[in-house]
Amino acid sequence: MSVLPIRTVEDPVLRLIAEPVTAFDAELDQLITDLSETLVASGGAGLAAPQLGVSLRVFALNPDLPGNDLRLDHLVNPVLEFPDEEEQRGPEGCLSIPGIYLDTRRRMNVAAKGYTKLGDPVQVVGAGLMARCIQHETDHLDGVLFIDKQDAEAQARLIATMRAASWWDDRTVKVSPH
C-alpha cells in the first residue's frame, strides 16, 4: 500500500502552479495509485499531487462522491468550464489544513476536461459536492488553497485557529496572490 504523508498548509509546494503532465507512463500510474490510496486512507473527497509534494497537474477523486456518474477516480491536466453563473455556499475543508472547515463559495456546476492516466481524453460534468471537489482540487494545482477564498477577517481568524491547533508548530502561512 502506498499511503504517503500529506503536505500541510505551510509547505511551499502547495503555493506553486503545478506543471502539466507530459508523460503518461508508469511513474504517472504510480503517482495516481499513491494519490488514490492516500485519499482512501485519509477519508477525504479529493487529493491533488502537490499535497503529496509532487508539482504535477493531477488529482484523485473519491469515486463515491454524489454526482460522479462516471465513477471517475482521477483527472490529469484538468481544464474547467462553467456552464452558468449559479453559485453554492457550504462548508469546505482540506486534508492539508486538518480540522478546519469554512463556509466557502464555489460555482454550482462545472465541466472538467482532462485525461485519464492512459492519456485518453475525458470530461466529467459535476454539480454540488462533485463540482466543489473538482474546483477545490484544481485550485491546488494552481497554488490556491480554500483559505484564499475567504475575506481578510476570516483569514485572520483561520490563522489564529491554526496556530492553536495541535498539529501547528510555529509555522508561517502565506495567502496566495492568485
Image: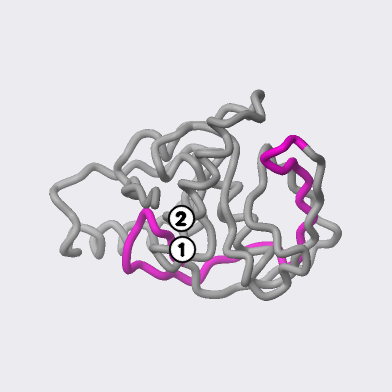
Image quarter of the C terminus: top right
Measuring from the top left, give residue 46's x and y in whole percent. 53, 58
Q: Residue at x 57, y 52 (%)?
A: 60
| Secondary structure at numbered mark 2 | helix
Q: Residue at x 35, y 47 (%)?
A: 4
For residue 125, what is the image quadrant? bottom right
- Please name the residue that numbered disc 2 is placed on: 37
Which residues make up the magenta segment? 93-119
| Colour convention of the picture | one colour
Q: Are marks 2 and 1 in contact (CB under 8 Å)?
A: yes
Measuring from the top left, give residue 82's x and y in whole percent. 80, 55
Which label is found at residue 76? none
Measuring from the top left, give residue 171's x and y in whole percent. 20, 45
Q: Is residue 57 magenta?
A: no
Query: Disc 1 residue type?
Result: Val
Q: 44 left or right of 120?
A: left
Overall secondary structure of the magenta section: strand
Measuring from the top left, give residue 139's x and y in whole percent. 57, 47
Query: Disc 2 residue type?
Result: Glu
- Please name the residue that numbered disc 1 is placed on: 40
